Structure formats: structure tokens, C-alpha cells
Image (tube, rainbow, N blue to C red):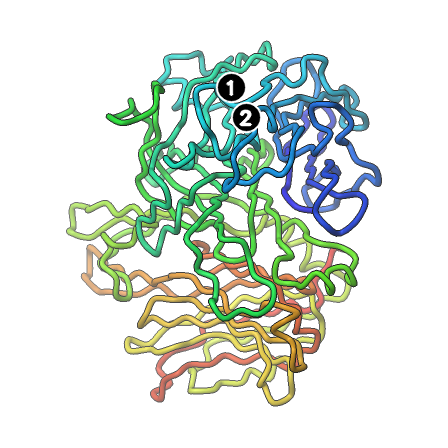
């Protein structure tokens, strides 16, 4: 399985739905259909045994690719999806016009059965005047800011975006306007962005690539109450950052990014479009193996909820075939804007150089910092902690030396960990080590180095010689800093604590640092666990473990 598709909520039945690309015939990519699941609470899911959408029509016989759930007024659940009639499709290849088209499917019985509309494909191909690198993965929602700039009715107008790129020019997403009374009529508006190939504002923001996939838009509330325009996109054709000496499995050169921007009239050298989105700041939604993030607005929690694909790229084909399955969905995540006030600096980088944040000067000569934050869906987190076999361990207020062993044993491969550390002024490398051998030579390590403002997640190899040919256990890394604020009243300065949250489920590890840096990865060589320790590369012991909470054996009641 791979991309999540059409996450959403059906008010008619009170059920949540999420689908995903699925090969019902094996663990290799191919024969792509949609599998579907439903839930009453976004926690407990029922997965259908048979595909909900299959590649059984002339316009989609090569695959039912990624799509979305559309808002409707006819009482149906309506899916928009990419219907594929020719393969291969890749941004590096010439794009066969019409190989990717847009189709709809409807259900009037709460998702039990689906009918493809007679008008399919409702858009037979990409805009005729463009040579595209891709044209797929529709996403549809209301967008008040877009209606305002285009002078359209915000209550009856929907906006659709289809991801791709313009060959040798830019990755982009193609904007369409849709009247909610006729979901089969999509009016082309134009490309939404034109940033050029492989735009890379800095290491904090990532590579925007050559082609986009599964682009989503939403509006989040900023610190001042204003609404902020956000795009999330999978970026293909990135300049490779893979470890050059890998002899085994490796990942495609792509990223899962986000950006905040403003909608405005286009500038010079822009394709014929009445609107473009100007880049303000952006970053990685996840720095690891997570990809194809797809989202929806949940009216019950009033949050934007994101699902994504946890890939199997780090496992060789032979072991993947032996495993018998490939890929899974991440934990659902909540999005919000994080705001920190009265900031004077990060660890080392100038605030102006950190392109994943917005920094606004305040009247006190300090800055208000804003950036995107994510965390797992909190009701799911609390439900997992209530599992019948959970064992909780806590530690508080411990001074850290060069190797502070917590003597905390982890006995399962399903756990949640929270660690909060106050760093000394001259702190070196500091973090968490989970041993997978008695002598700790094989371990998982999550470390922060304030000197180079980098989080590193080290993974253990398999415990035999040719491990590197079978699995990719190269370290993950992500830029991260801690902000120092100055009180406008006392003028005292304080630095935020390092907060690491991690969830493990068998071979999957999802890590969140201060909510604004996320890394998802696979642990194929970590079946055994012999203990957990907190380490600090400093002699003074002046860094302090504020709190450690471990929930071992998490699971749904």
C-alpha cells in the first residue's frame, strides 16, 4: 500500500473515512486500486476486504491513483481521483497527454458501494498549452482567501488543485474553480506557483524539487488571529542527499514539505494566471521516510488532520517479499501554528537565516516567531495509553552526567516516550539511547547537538555482516534549534527546553521534537531492547532531565 486517499468525515453517518492506494495482488507496486476504512472516532477502524475503487474502466485500467473527498450538497460521498490509462509515468519521462485524467466516484449508502460517474473522465488531460511533468492527485476544499482575490462566492465555490510541474520550468500545482452545484465542471485558473527548479531557500526549508505530488491547501489561524495560507506537497526530483556509499536499498530523491505564502496578482514571467502564491517561509513536514501527506478538516475537533504513507524503501526486495506486505499509514497528525514570543536568538543561526519560521519584530526589540507544528492526533494518544498491558515509568529532575542510565527497561516494541531536558549554556550533544544489544553497540539514538543545530536519529543494522545489503540503516537528520526569549518585564533570558516525543510500533518510529521537527523512520534491526538511557556529552552535569515518561506496551483497549 502507499498514498492515503480521500480522508474525510461524512456528517450523514457520523463516520470518518480514509482510503489508500493498494495492490490487492501482492507486495510489489502495481494493479493500483483503492482500499477503504471507516471509523466513528478516528481511532478504531474497520478495513474493507475488497477494493472500493478498482482499475476496471478504459480510462483508469492502469491504475486508480491518489485523490480526495469533495464537499457535496447531494447527500453523497464523492471521490475525485487520478484515472491512469498509460504507464510508466515519472517526472523524468516525457508525459503522454491523457495518461493521467480526472474522474469522480459517488456513494449514496455511506461508502458501502461506489459508482463511477458517467461523465468520466471529467477532465481528460492536463491543460493543452502546457508540457507537464505530472498532473495528478486532486485535492478539493473551500478556500476563503482564494475566493476573495478571485472575487468569487466563498460559500458556493470550491477550489481544486492537481499536482505536477511544468517541464524545465517549475514544480507547481494547477488551480481549478468548481461550483459546488456541479462537481463535474472544473474551470482551469492557472498554475498556482512558479519558483523554478530545485528552489532551496536554505537547509531549514528543503528542496522544492521538479515535480509536486499530493499537494494540499488549508488555512490555519496565526498568533494575531489572522488566517495563514498553507500548502503541503510531496516534492520529487530533489537534488539527492542520499548517503553516497550505500550498497543496499536507498530512497528516491524526494521530500515532504510545507510552505506558507500569500495570494496575490502574479508578477512578471508568470504563466497566464490571475493569482499566484508567493513563498514566505516553509519547511519539512517530516524529515524521514514519510511521504504523500493527505489531509482534511475535521469538523468535530476543528483541526486539520493529516495522514501520510510510511514507506518501505529501506528494506530490500527479498526481505520485503518475505515479509509479505509493504507500507502503512502514519499516525494521524494534527496541524497548528506554533508561536513563541519575545525571542532574541536561536542556538547559533541568525533568526533571519532560519527560513522555516516567520519572525516579526515587536515593540520591545524582540521577535515573535511562528512556524508549523504537528503532533499525533491527541485522542489516539490517550487511547493508546489506556491499553490493557501498558506499564508507565516516570523520572523527574535528574542532573545529567556524561552517561546517565535511567535503568528503564523497554519490554515491547509498542511504546510512547516523552523526554524533556533543560540544556546547559555550553551543552554539547545530548539525547536518548535505546540499546538493542547488551553492550549497547547496536542502538537507536535520538541526539540533539546545539553546536550545529542538528537532530540526528541513528538506527541499528541487522546483527550480521551483510546487513547493509539488506536494509538501509543510515542515520536520519534534521535541522533544529532552541529559541531564547527575553522577558519584557524583568529582561531575564530563558531558553526553551528540548522536548522529544517518540512513538514506536514494531518497525516504525515517529519522532517529534518541540512539535516543529518530525522524523519518521524504520527500525528493521531493533527487535530486542535492553534498556533506555539519557546521555549528555558534557562534564559539568549542568544539563537537567526535567521529565521522562515511558508508556511501554501501548495499544487500543
The answer to whether residue 283 is above or below residue 394 is: above
Q: Quadrant of the C terminus?
A: bottom right
Q: Quadrant of residue 59?
A: top right
Query: Which of these two is toward me, 12 or 25?
Result: 25
State the residue lying farthest toward the right.
49
Res. 544 in view: yes
Residue 222 left/right relative to 368: right
State the residue lying farthest toward the top.
181
Identify which residue is drawn at 60% across, 70% down.
Answer: 550
Question: Horizontal and vertical percent for residue 231?
Answer: 44, 37
Identify which residue is drawn at 71% across, 58% down.
Answer: 386
Identify which residue is drawn at 70% across, 62% down.
Answer: 554
The answer to whether residue 404 is above or below residue 181 is: below
Mark 2 vs 1: CB contact within 8 A: yes
Question: Horizontal and vertical percent for residue 208?
Answer: 40, 45
Q: Which residue is mark 2?
A: 140
Separation (CA) of disc 2 from disc 1: 7 Å
The local secondary structure at tag 1 comes to strand
The local secondary structure at tag 2 comes to strand
Q: Quadrant of residue 10?
A: top right
Query: Which of these two is toward me, 319 or 529?
Result: 319
Q: Which residue is mark 1?
A: 158
- Labels 2 and 1: the sequence-earlier one: 2
Mark 2 is surrounded, within 10 Å at the Cα level, by few (under 14), some (14 to 19) or many (20 or more) other residues, namely: many
Question: Horizontal and vertical percent for residue 479?
Answer: 38, 61
Identify which residue is drawn at 55% across, 57% down.
Answer: 251
Res. 303 in view: no
Amino acid at each position: 500500500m502507499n498514498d492515503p486517499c480521500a480522508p474525510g468525515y461524512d456528517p450523514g453517518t457520523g463516520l470518518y473515512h480514509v482510503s489508500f492506494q493498494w495492490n490487492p495482488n501482492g507486495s510489489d507496486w502495481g494493479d493500483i486500486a483503492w482500499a477503504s476504512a471507516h471509523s466513528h472516532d478516528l481511532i478504531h477502524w474497520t478495513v474493507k476486504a475488497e477494493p472500493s475503487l478498482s482499475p476496471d474502466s478504459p480510462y483508469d485500467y492502469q491504475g486508480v491513483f491518489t485523490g480526495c473527498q469533495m464537499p457535496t450538497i447531494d447527500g453523497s460521498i464523492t471521490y475525485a481521483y487520478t484515472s491512469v490509462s498509460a504507464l510508466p509515468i515519472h517526472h523524468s519521462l516525457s508525459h503522454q497527454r491523457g495518461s493521467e485524467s480526472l474522474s469522480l466516484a459517488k456513494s449514496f449508502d455511506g461508502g458501502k458501494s461506489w459508482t463511477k460517474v458517467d461523465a468520466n473522465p471529467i477532465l481528460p488531460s492536463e491543460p493543452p498549452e502546457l508540457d507537464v511533468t505530472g498532473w495528478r492527485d486532486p485535492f478539493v476544499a473551500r478556500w476563503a482567501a482564494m475566493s476573495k482575490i478571485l472575487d468569487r462566492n466563498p460559500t458556493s465555490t470550491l477550489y481544486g488543485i492537481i499536482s505536477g510541474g511544468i517541464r524545465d520550468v517549475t514544480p507547481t500545482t494547477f488551480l481549478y474553480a468548481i461550483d459546488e452545484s456541479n462537481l463535474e465542471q472544473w474551470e482551469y485558473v492557472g498554475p498556482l506557483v512558479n519558483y523554478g527548479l530545485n528552489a532551496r531557500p536554505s537547509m531549514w526549508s528543503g528542496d522544492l524539487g521538479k515535480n509536486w505530488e499530493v499537494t494540499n491547501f488549508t488555512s490555519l489561524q496565526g498568533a494575531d488571529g489572522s488566517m495563514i495560507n498553507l500548502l503541503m506537497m510531496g516534492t520529487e526530483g530533489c537534488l539527492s542527499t542520499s548517503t553516497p556509499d550505500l550498497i543496499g536499498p536507498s530512497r528516491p530523491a524526494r521530500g515532504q514539505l510545507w510552505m506558507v505564502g500569500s495570494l496575490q496578482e502574479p508578477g512578471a514571467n508568470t504563466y497566464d494566471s490571475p493569482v499566484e502564491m508567493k513563498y514566505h517561509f516553509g519547511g519539512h513536514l517530516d524529515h524521514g521516510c514519510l511521504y504523500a501527506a493527505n489531509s482534511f478538516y475535521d469538523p468535530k475537533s476543528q483541526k486539520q488532520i493529516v495522514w501520510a504513507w510510511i514507506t518501505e524503501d529501506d528494506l530490500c526486495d527479498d526481505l520485503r517479499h518475505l515479509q509479505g506486505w509493504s507500507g502503512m499509514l502514519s499516525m494521524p497528525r494534527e496541524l497548528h501554528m506554533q508561536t513563541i514570543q519575545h525571542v532574541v536568538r536561536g542556538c547559533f543561526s541568525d533568526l533571519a537565516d532560519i527560513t522555516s519560521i516567520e519572525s516579526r519584530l515587536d515593540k520591545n526589540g524582540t521577535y515573535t516567531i511562528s512556524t508549523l507544528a504537528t503532533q499525533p492526533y491527541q485522542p489516539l494518544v490517550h487511547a493508546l495509553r489506556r491499553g490493557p498491558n501498558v506499564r508507565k515509568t516516570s523520572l523527574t529532575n535528574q542532573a545529567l552526567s556524561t552517561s546517565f542510565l535511567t535503568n528503564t527497561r523497554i519490554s515491547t516494541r509498542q511504546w510512547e516516550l516523552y523526554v524533556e531536558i533543560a540544556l546547559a549554556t555550553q551543552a554539547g550533544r545530548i539525547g536518548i539511547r535505546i540499546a538493542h544489544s547488551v553492550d549497547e553497540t547496536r542502538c537507536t539514538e535520538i541526539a540533539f547537538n546545539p553546536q550545529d543545530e542538528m537532530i540526528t536519529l541513528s538506527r541499528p543494522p541487522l546483527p550480521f555482516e551483510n546487513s547493509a545489503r539488506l536494509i538501509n540503516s543510515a542515520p536520519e537528520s534534521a535541522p533544529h534549534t532552541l529559541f531564547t526569549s527575553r522577558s519584557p518585564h524583568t529582561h531575564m533570558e530563558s531558553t526553551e527546553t528540548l522536548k522529544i516525543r517518540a512513538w514506536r510500533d514494531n518497525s516504525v518510529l515517529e519522532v517529534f521534537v518541540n512539535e516543529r521537527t518530525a522524523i519518521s523512520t524504520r527500525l528493521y534491526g531493533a527487535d530486542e531492547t535492553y534498556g533506555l538511557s539519557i546521555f549528555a556529552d558534557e562534564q559539568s552535569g549542568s544539563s537537567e532531565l526535567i521529565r521522562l515518561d515511558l508508556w511501554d506496551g501501548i495499544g487500543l483497549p
